[in-house]
Amino acid sequence: MADKPKLTAVGTGDIPPARPRSRSSIGFPYSDLAEVERAAHLVAGSLGRCKPEQLAAWLGHTTLDSGAFRNKVVAGKLFRILQGGRNVIELTRLGQQLLEEVTVRQARVEAFLSVALYRSIFESHRGKRMPGNLGLELEMVRLGVSRTQVKPARQVFVRSAGQAGLFEAGSHRLVLPKGTIFPVPSVEERGEGPHAASRAAGYPKVIAAILEQAPWNSEWSQEEFEAWAGLLVQAARLHFKASPESGRS
């Protein structure tokens, strides 16, 4: 009699190993612009600077190790609203402008467009109809967002665009709100060193975007630096392939 095929009941037998989570090769925030603006107001209430544990408590987080808190701090840096390292968090000049009634609309636009991913999408679709959710996610994947992370990336993008006033002319078009201009920040305003522009010039867009986020003149924690360096190495491997015979890494 022929052997019967072996059946495995659901929840029994060997569990296949989990697929490794792919990493994005371009930075993007997991917290939206409104959450960062709230954090900016709290820091401003402490004369523009505070300890990380203070901000965590003010935002309702019980520990500095909270993933939600870390996401807000990283988002604040990506939006160029917050800066600092392990011992202090403070407002940037743009963060201060975000709190002023006469400059808040322009500051929100500049904060949104400070995220390399967001700026690329805005420049690609300015004056045009935005793609649907699937089209937008495909574009984000093409720009370097991992497929496993693209849905939250899209959701935060859409919320932040609305919070920056970019949907005032309609929910299907990205248009600068009235009273604002397209920002062209200088190297100094972006917190980069004097040679940052030449460092990024001539590289593929994904690598250039990662280089633009480098801590040229700021203090990063070891964990933040290693995460940034890991993205750079991964992007470099995608674009620059060494010959195995060359003996060079």
Image (spheres, helix red, strand yellow):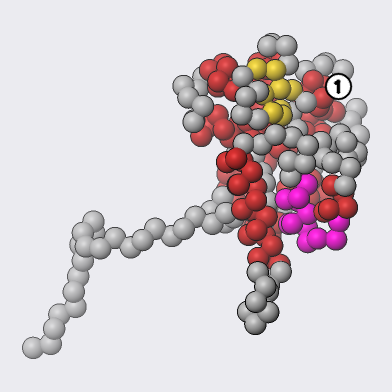
Q: Is residue 165 visible?
A: no
User: Does residue 63 appear left or right of residue 4 in this picture?
Assistant: right
Q: Amino acid at mark 1?
A: Thr
Q: Is residue 154 above or below residue 66?
A: below
Q: Provide residue 44's location: percent of width, then percent of height.
A: 71, 15
Q: Provide residue 107's location: percent of width, then percent of height.
A: 82, 27
Outermost residue toward the front in this view: 247
Q: Provide residue 28's location: percent of width, then percent of height.
A: 66, 44
Q: Main secondary structure of the magenta part?
A: helix
- Residue pointed to by mark 1: 103
The quarter of the picture where residue 178 lies is top right
Look at the image and tell me in which quarter the N terminus lies. Answer: bottom left
Look at the image and tell me in which quarter the C terminus lies. Answer: bottom right
User: Does residue 63 appear left or right of residue 10 in this picture?
Assistant: right
Q: Residue at x 61, y 53 (%)?
A: 230
Q: Which residues are magenta?
A: 201-213
